[in-house]
Image: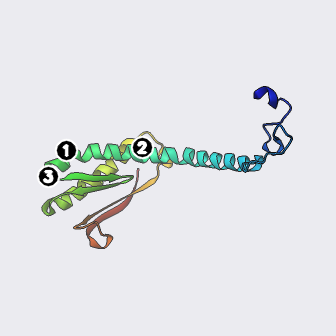
Amino acid sequence: MDHHMHGTDCHRPSRMKTFGARPVHFPETADAFKQHLSSVQRRVQRQRRNGPIQGTVADLMKIAIHLMHESLAAMGAQIVLFVHDELLIEVGEHESRKALLTAWNAMHGAMRKLTWRMPAQERVAMRVKADIRTTWSDDDVIHDHNSPAKW
């Protein structure tokens, strides 16, 4: 079949013809292909910008979990959910404030570990938000401990 296509321009879909010289139209024209390529390029550019940010947050969370794990276990607390940049820790009411401070301090400790080599002018402010709730509802905050820090 390939030897019959030598006289056709198969790289330009708008000019393709059958052996009987009837034009063959494809919905994916060169312009559509360019648009598709452009959207792929934009997606790759977004991923290149966002990748280091998401990767750094993942590094931060891994370090923080490592720093708080033993302390949480000692008070009978456990991490029950970890999604993106949030942790859900289950703990008894009598240890809840201690667990909150443990998690908050671990997050700031992780940031210090990640940024200790960076010049001060390149460091960014990071806000750690931590609160105590009896349910998952945003309306059920009993105590919160939020403050920005610059490392």
Q: Residue at x 65, y 50 (%)?
A: 39
Q: Amino acid at mark 2?
A: Thr
For residue 116, side relative to residue 34 (left or right): left
Q: Amino acid at mark 3?
A: Gly
Q: Nearer the viewer, mark 2 or mark 1?
A: 1
User: Label 3: which residue?
Assistant: 76
Q: Amino acid at mark 1?
A: Glu
In what quadrant of the picture does the N terminus appear?
A: top right
Q: Residue at x 36, y 62 (%)?
A: 147
Residue 49 position within the rendered picture, expressed as x and y whole percent measured from the top left:
56, 47
User: Label 1: which residue?
Assistant: 70
Label 3 environment density (alpha carbons within 10 Å; few <14, some 14–19, many ≥20): few
User: Label 2: which residue?
Assistant: 115
Q: Quadrant of residue 98?
A: bottom left
Tell me which label, 3 or 1, sits earlier in the chain: 1
Residue 107 position within the rendered picture, expressed as x and y whole percent measured from the top left:
33, 51
Tell me which label, 2 or 3, sits earlier in the chain: 3
